Image (cartoon, rainbow, N blue to C red):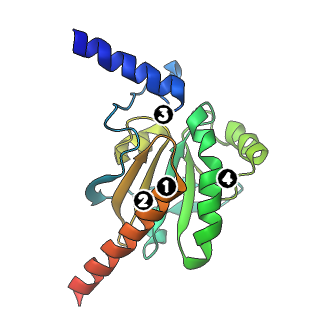
Amino acid sequence: MAARFATLALLAALVSSGAACSRSDSDAGIDPTEEEVGASSIEVFDAPEFFLPKLGGGEIALADLRGRVVVLDFWATWCGPCEESIPVLNAFFDAHRASGVEVYGIATDADGAEVVAPWVAEREIRYPILIGDYELAQRYGAPGLPVSFVVAPDGRVIDRHIGFIEIEDLEQSLARARSYWRAVSSQRL
């Protein structure tokens, strides 16, 4: 009983501190545990495929991004830590887009583009936004929001970041993805 109370208190502290968001009552989801918040290295797995509408027009399929490192950031307009991550993701996007690194925000809001578009414009998000849902985030293994996944050029997820993300975390994940890809590519020769 005491352990359960301690876990609940920790989760409440994490959410109130902005470390991560649970889903709203209308979007019932789960909260991350202490061990999950900020975690980055995970067991490598095949990224679930998707074909999503892009805010502003067009569509993106994960398969179309093969050959590039891809950062997928799942978020929602009602999530405070999601908003706090925008400057970091903007800076990472600006620093690496010329080198073929892709950054996509995947909005999980139930009301879709109608709610997302003005929110994105107001916050001056520079990286492309896709309109998804929390079900896709769960297929990736998201325990809450925000959560970012780093996908290697072969379509395998090599890192996961839960909660607010730091630029150093993204840079380390990019280095890990490139190292992984060099190792995998050399084995194919």
Where residue 117 appears, as percent x and y from the top left, is: 72, 44
Residue 119 to residue 66: above or below: above
Where residue 76 appears, as percent x and y from the top left, is: 58, 37
Q: Which amino acid does label 2 sit on?
A: Val
Q: Tell me which label, 1 or 2, sits earlier in the chain.
A: 1
At x 43%, y 77%, the residue is: 67
- Of tags 3 and 4, the one toward the viewer is 3
Q: Which residue is tagged 1?
A: 72
Mark 3 vs 4: CB contact within 8 A: no
Q: Which amino acid does label 4 sit on?
A: Leu
Mark 1 vs 4: CB contact within 8 A: no
Q: Which residue is tagged 4?
A: 55
Mark 2 crowd level (few <14, some 14–19, many ≥20, 10 Å Cα): many
Q: Report helix, strand or loop for mark 2.
A: strand
Q: Which residue is tagged 3?
A: 20
The Cα atoms of the two marked residues, 3 and 4, are separated by: 24 Å
Residue 45 to residue 66: above or below: above
Mark 3 vs 1: CB contact within 8 A: no
